[in-house]
């Protein structure tokens, strides 16, 4: 089951025509200008013209609108773009952050436990 944050949507809030290029840009994390320029270059090259235009309109009709609650936080949006681009790297980064938090928490625990013999005994009893 995929999260709604990892799906491709058309982005009507930043749309110029149907929101397909803006949706692809949001999905990939690439600036929408570059996606639009790539679309125009592919269109003008003539090689992909018969495919690009129908594909654009089919995507415009089939893709769902991006839900409004996904527009809330730019920081969260960047995080989910990272998840879509490289999930393994994102998991590695989270694991690294959690190791750092765990290390810091262990040092706080060691500080308080070493200064409080009653707390030390209680923690040992719980283990």
Image (cartoon, helix red, strand yellow):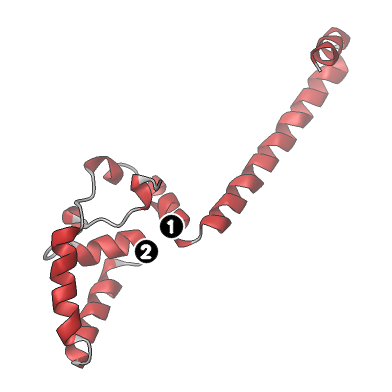
Q: Which residue is mark 2?
A: 28
Q: Is residue 25 visible?
A: yes
Q: Sequence order check: which comes first, mark 1 or mark 2?
A: 2
* Residue 64, disc: none
Q: Position of residue 9 (x, y in %)?
A: 25, 55
Q: Is residue 46 above or below residue 4?
A: below
Q: Which residue is mark 1?
A: 84
In this rendering, the answer to whether 115 lies above or below 15 is above
The image quadrant of residue 121 is top right
Instruction: Please state the horizontal and vertical placement of residue 2, each as a whole percent of the image.
Output: 39, 48
Toward the viewer: 49 or 119? Answer: 49
Circle 2: element type: helix
Query: What residue is at 65 percent from the left and 47 percent from the top?
Result: 96
Tell me residue 109's x, y (percent): 77, 24
Q: Residues within 10 Å of mark 1 (few under 14, many from 20)?
A: some
Gap in Å between the C-alphas at discs 1 and 2?
7 Å
Q: Is residue 98 left or right of residue 11?
A: right
Residue at the location (66% across, 36% down)?
A: 101
């Amino acid at each position: 089951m995929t999260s709604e944050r990892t799906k491709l949507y058309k982005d009507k809030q930043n749309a110029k025509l149907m929101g397909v290029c803006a949706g692809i840009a949001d999905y990939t994390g690439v600036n929408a200008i570059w996606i639009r320029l790539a679309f125009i270059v592919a269109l003008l090259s003539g090689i992909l013209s018969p495919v690009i235009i129908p594909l654009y309109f089919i995507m415009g009709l089939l893709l769902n609108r991006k839900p409004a609650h996904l527009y809330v936080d730019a920081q969260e949006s960047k995080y989910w773009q990272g998840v879509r681009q490289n999930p393994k790297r994102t998991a590695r980064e989270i694991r690294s952050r959690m190791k750092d938090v765990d290390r810091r928490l262990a040092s706080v625990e060691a500080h308080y436990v070493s200064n409080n013999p009653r707390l030390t005994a209680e923690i040992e009893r719980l283990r």
